[in-house]
Structure formats: structure tokens, C-alpha cells
């Protein structure tokens, strides 16, 4: 079994305590590798290394073009090893090889490249035309890196989340400390290898494997860290925000969701049914923006549900390393138990189980759960309000579109959502009324590196990706340049002089 080390200050090292733990394959429940368990001391050393690297100017002092040249080499290294990365991503987190080969790894690398390309073009100089008084003073903004940026990521998309945290931080001139989730550390460590092979200077990227309560806490409280970006649960987001408050760090939070898919009467039935199912069951529902509440009009309800039931039956659970498998297990026993608990809650709340609801037959090992659909769901039920983070869809019947929109918005979350309709102008009007950071029309889950992604309400703070996401890794400095150099023109100095 391979024993991994973590990256601190340009070196791959064990934890100072020497402690390690196995990481498991959720499909087989077998251990697949040993990883270090970082201590608070390890976290401090990583943060100090990132601080030193930032303050030295070895990275922030390079031009965007010079930084990009190194980062493109990281992309090339990742690409050379894409099939190995896809396999590892599938084995560590329980994603299907179909998904990691088609999506996580190639799309992750593509996001990396696009973020670097975009970041490279963001000018440091930003004019302020409305306060430019050319004969008196010249005012402009200089975009600067923030400093040491910590990234704390979850287990659902370990490779993609690594890229979302590291690429924007580094291209904008910051240094980074990344903490993957303990269940899925491997592709982040492989990413670190590629980064060092590509010639990233020591300390610019550090990757720590350890507990949120130890390593995550140190990253959120250290006075040497300038920003924390978390993807994780809303509960962790609240904690991170509180911890970051003591040193007034910048935070970007991408948190939970309970996103709506709203089907309109005129929707293309094939597109809407498969879209709603893709929205929910992609990666066994372990996606923050999953469309876990599907609103269906009464007039087409029976036809929609008949078709939906038939299509759910086509989702194929199986060995994650088999290309034919379209849905894998959930990530851990803990997650499995939580989802099963919610299925029981749904039943006891009076929702009707349309299909699924338990372990599939023929799986002796692995945290597998059947794709599960409830109908007769009331939007006030716990299964419609709380994030389950598993393969469970709640179908809610509606009479009028206004009613669907108001139920869609009746949630503490506001991450994603979809509208299925042939009437695009109407769909766009409705999309504007949904209080979430992304709305897809006649599609789902298409996250684009060029467009901002993030949450309204308790789904988060700030944005990732796109120009908006890159700017969150910069500081805005106003520079005022007096152009007269003439004391006699300084009547405001006379606020303190009377001669
Ligand atoms: P989690 O919140 O438990 O953990 C996320 C990360 O935060 C992990 O690396 C964990 O170690 C760390 N962490 C936990 N407690 C911490 C603390 N007190 N201080 C600092 N760091 C801490 O979530 P999870 O179980 O890994 O992932 C599933 C959850 O993440 C889901 O609820 C989902 O809603 C959310 N999620 C959101 C998005 C998004 O983009 N909005 C994406 C993926 C997952
Ligand atoms: Mn694992």
C-alpha cells in the first residue's frame, strides 16, 4: 500500500508525530493508501512557509505571465497523468470511473487552464475615470494579491476543488495552504507532486492532510493567514466565519444547498425528466448544487412521474471502476447512515416512496444506496428543507407557477436550481425570481470556469470561478498621486495651519 507524504515548504514530509491513517475505497471498504495526520505544529510550519514565500516576493514579484508559464506546466503534468488521476479519484472518493474520466479530471484541468488564462489577463492597473482630475491628481486602483490563502475542501470533488482553490490563489500572486478532506486526500497530494515537478517555488503551495478541528482550525485562526476559502457544509461555514473573525480574515464560503428544479407545463418531457434525474443523482447526490426538490405541475404530474420512474430504473449501480456503472456508493459509513436516517424521516413525515429507499440487492460491501424518489412531499417537510447530500429526490406537485417559485425560495439555502420550459423569455423571467447564485434553463450542473459560482443566503459568501471569483483573490489598493506638487494649492492643509 502506498504511503503518501504531505507538502510543506517544498518538501514531501510525514507528520511531525509520525502518525498516519488509511484512506478507504467506499466501493470496497478496503484501505487503499496511508496518509499522514498533520498536527497543529505541522499546520503552523506550512503557514509559516507560505508566509515566507509570499513576503519574499519569489511568487508575488513575478509577472502574471511568468506565474502563468509555471502554472501551465502544472497543467501539462496533470494531463500526462490523467488516467492515473481518474482512477485514484474514483477509488478514493467512490465516484465512478465514468465520471472521473469524463468529468472530474479533464474538466478540472480545463478549469485550471481557463482560470490561469483569465487571471493572467486581469490588469493590475484599474482606472477610476469618475475620480480622475488629471490636472490635480491621478487616482487609480492597483490590484494586489491578498497574501497567504488557505483552502479547505470537502470529499465530494477532491480534484476539482483542489483546482478551484489553488489556481485562482496562485495566478493572482498569493501563496496557498490547502487542506483536503481526510476521506479523500490522494488526488490533492498527486496535484502537489505535479506542482513541484513543474517548478513551483518552495512554500508557494503547501498541502496538509489532517482533521478540520486541528489543521482547519489553525488555518482559520492563524494571524499569518490572510484569507480562508471553504467548500463544505453550512455548519462548518458558520464555524469558519466565526474563527476567522478574530483576525478579520477575508472568507469565501461555498456551502450547502437544497436546490429546486422547476418543470413547467410546456417542458420537453424527455429533457425535463432526465435533467431532473441528472440534477439529483449525479455523483449519488453528493453535490452541493444538486436539484433535490423537483416541482412538477399537476397537469402533467402523472405522465412525468411514470416517465421518471422508468428512467430511474436505468441508473446502474456497480463497481466504480467499471465504465458501465453510472452511480457509485456514497463516500463513507457516516454519510450512508445519515442518508438512511433521512429516508426514514421522509417515510415518517408521510412522503410516499416511489422507488429506492435502501441498499441495493447484491452488494455485500460498499456504501451503496439505491436512487430514491419520494413524492407527495410538502415543501415544509424536513426532507425538503434539510440537505441530505445523497441520492434522494423529493417531488413536489404544484398548481400555479407563482406557487412553485415561492416554494423554491422557501429555503435557508440558495445555491443552484433549474427551470425546464420551451418558453425561454418566460424561463429567464422566472430565473430572475429564484434567489440562488446559479439557475440553469433546460440543463443542470453545468458549471463553467468562466462564470461565477456561489450561494445566496446560507449557501455561502462570495463567488468562485469567472472574473468575480478571481477578483476575490485580490486586494484593492487606491493610489492617489498629486500632480501639482504645489503647496499654495493645498488649501486643505490650512485645516491645521492658520498662518
Ligand atoms: P464538512 O463541512 O464537514 O468539511 C469540509 C471541510 O472542512 C473538510 O476539509 C473538513 O475537514 C473541514 N472542517 C470541518 N470542520 C472544520 C472546522 N471546525 N474548522 C475548519 N475546518 C473544518 O463537509 P463535508 O462533509 O466534507 O462535505 C459535505 C458538505 O459540504 C455538504 O453538506 C455540502 O453541502 C457541502 N458542499 C458544498 C459545496 C459548495 O460548493 N457549496 C461543495 C461541496 C460540498
Ligand atoms: Mn477515501
Image (cartoon, rainbow, N blue to C red):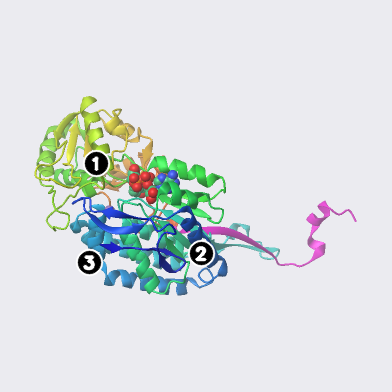
Question: CB under 8 Å between callouts 1 and 3?
Answer: no
Which is closer to the viewer, label 3 or label 2? 2
The residue beneath circle 2 is 49
Residue at point 54%, 45% (across, down): 245
Tell me the quarter of the picture where residue 238 sits. Answer: top left
Residue where numbered disc 1 is placed: 336
Report the Cα–Cα distance between label 1 and label 3.
28 Å
Q: Position of residue 100 (x, y in %)?
A: 23, 59
Image: 259 above or below 42: above
Q: Looking at the picture, tell me which residue is in the foreground, 171 or 90.
A: 90
Residue 138 x/y as whole percent = 65, 64
The percent position of residue 243, horizontal first and vertical second, equals: 51, 44
Question: What segment is highlighted magenta in the picture?
Answer: 470-499
| Residue shown at 25% from the left, 61% from the top | 88
The number of callouts visible is 3
- Of 439 and 106, nearer the camera is 106
| Helix, strand or loop status at disc 1 | helix
Q: Secondary structure at mark 2?
A: helix
Q: Is residue 289 magenta?
A: no
**Residue located beneath label 3 in the image:** 83
Residue placed at 43% from the left, 68% from the top?
11
Q: Quadrant of residue 378?
A: top left
Amino acid at each position: 500500500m502506498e504511503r503518501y507524504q504531505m507538502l510543506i515548504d517544498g518538501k514531501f514530509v510525514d507528520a511531525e508525530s509520525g502518525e498516519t491513517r488509511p484512506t478507504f475505497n467506499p466501493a470496497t471498504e478496503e484501505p487503499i493508501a496511508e496518509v499522514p495526520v498533520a498536527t497543529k505544529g505541522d499546520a503552523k510550519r506550512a503557514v509559516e512557509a507560505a508566509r515566507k514565500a509570499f513576503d519574499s516576493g519569489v511568487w508575488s514579484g513575478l509577472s502574471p505571465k511568468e506565474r502563468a508559464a509555471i502554472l501551465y506546466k502544472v497543467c501539462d503534468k496533470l494531463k500526462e497523468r490523467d488516467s492515473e488521476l481518474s482512477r485514484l479519484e474514483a477509488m478514493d472518493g467512490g465516484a465512478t470511473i465514468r465520471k472521473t474520466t469524463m468529468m472530474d479530471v479533464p474538466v478540472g484541468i480545463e478549469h485550471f487552464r481557463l482560470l490561469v488564462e483569465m487571471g493572467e489577463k486581469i490588469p493590475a492597473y484599474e482606472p477610476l475615470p469618475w475620480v480622475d482630475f488629471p490636472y490635480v491628481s491621478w487616482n487609480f486602483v492597483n490590484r494586489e494579491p491578498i497574501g497567504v490563502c488557505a483552502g479547505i475542501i470537502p470529499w465530494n470533488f477532491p480534484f476539482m476543488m483542489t483546482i478551484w482553490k489553488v489556481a485562482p490563489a496562485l495566478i493572482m500572486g498569493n501563496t496557498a495552504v490547502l487542506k483536503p478532506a481526510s476521506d479523500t486526500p490522494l488526488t490533492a497530494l498527486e496535484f502537489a507532486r505535479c506542482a513541484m515537478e513543474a517548478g513551483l517555488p518552495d512554500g508557494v503551495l503547501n498541502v496538509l492532510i489532517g482533521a478540520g478541528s486541528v489543521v482547519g482550525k489553525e488555518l482559520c485562526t492563524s494571524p499569518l493567514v490572510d484569507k480562508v476559502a471553504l467548500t463544505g457544509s453550512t455548519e462548518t461555514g458558520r464555524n469558519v466565519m466565526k474563527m476567522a473573525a478574530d483576525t478579520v480574515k477575508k472568507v469565501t464560503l461555498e456551502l450547502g444547498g437544497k436546490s429546486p428544479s422547476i418543470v413547467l407545463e410546456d417542458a420537453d418531457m424527455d429533457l425535463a425528466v432526465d435533467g431532473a434525474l441528472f440534477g439529483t443523482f449525479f455523483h449519488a447526490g453528493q453535490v452541493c448544487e444538486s436539484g433535490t426538490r423537483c416541482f412538477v405541475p399537476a397537469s402533467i404530474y402523472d405522465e412525468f412521474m411514470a416517465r421518471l420512474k422508468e428512467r430511474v430504473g436505468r441508473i446502474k449501480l456497480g463497481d466504480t471502476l467499471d465504465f458501465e456503472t453510472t452511480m457509485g456508493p456514497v463516500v463513507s459509513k457516516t454519510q450512508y447512515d445519515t442518508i438512511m436516517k433521512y429516508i426514514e424521516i421522509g417515510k415518517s413525515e408521510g412522503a410516499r416512496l416511489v422507488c429506492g429507499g435502501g441498499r441495493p440487492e447484491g452488494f455485500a460491501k460498499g456504501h451503496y444506496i439505491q436512487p430514491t424518489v419520494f413524492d407527495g412531499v410538502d415543501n415544509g417537510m424536513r426532507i425538503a428543507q434539510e440537505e441530505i447530500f445523497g441520492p434522494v429526490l423529493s417531488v413536489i406537485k404544484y398548481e400555479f407557477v407563482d406557487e412553485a417559485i415561492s416554494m423554491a425560495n422557501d429555503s435557508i439555502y440558495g445555491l443552484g436550481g433549474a427551470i425546464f420550459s420551451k418558453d425561454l423569455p418566460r424561463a429567464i423571467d422566472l430565473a430572475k425570481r429564484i434567489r440562488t447564485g446559479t439557475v440553469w434553463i433546460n440543463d443542470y450542473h453545468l458549471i463553467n470556469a468562466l462564470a461565477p459560482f456561489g450561494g445566496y443566503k446560507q449557501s455561502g459568501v462570495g463567488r468562485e470561478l469567472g472574473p468575480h471569483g478571481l477578483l476575490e483573490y485580490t486586494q484593492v489598493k487606491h493610489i492617489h498621486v498629486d500632480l501639482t506638487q504645489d503647496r499654495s494649492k493645498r488649501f486643505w492643509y490650512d485645516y491645521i495651519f492658520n498662518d
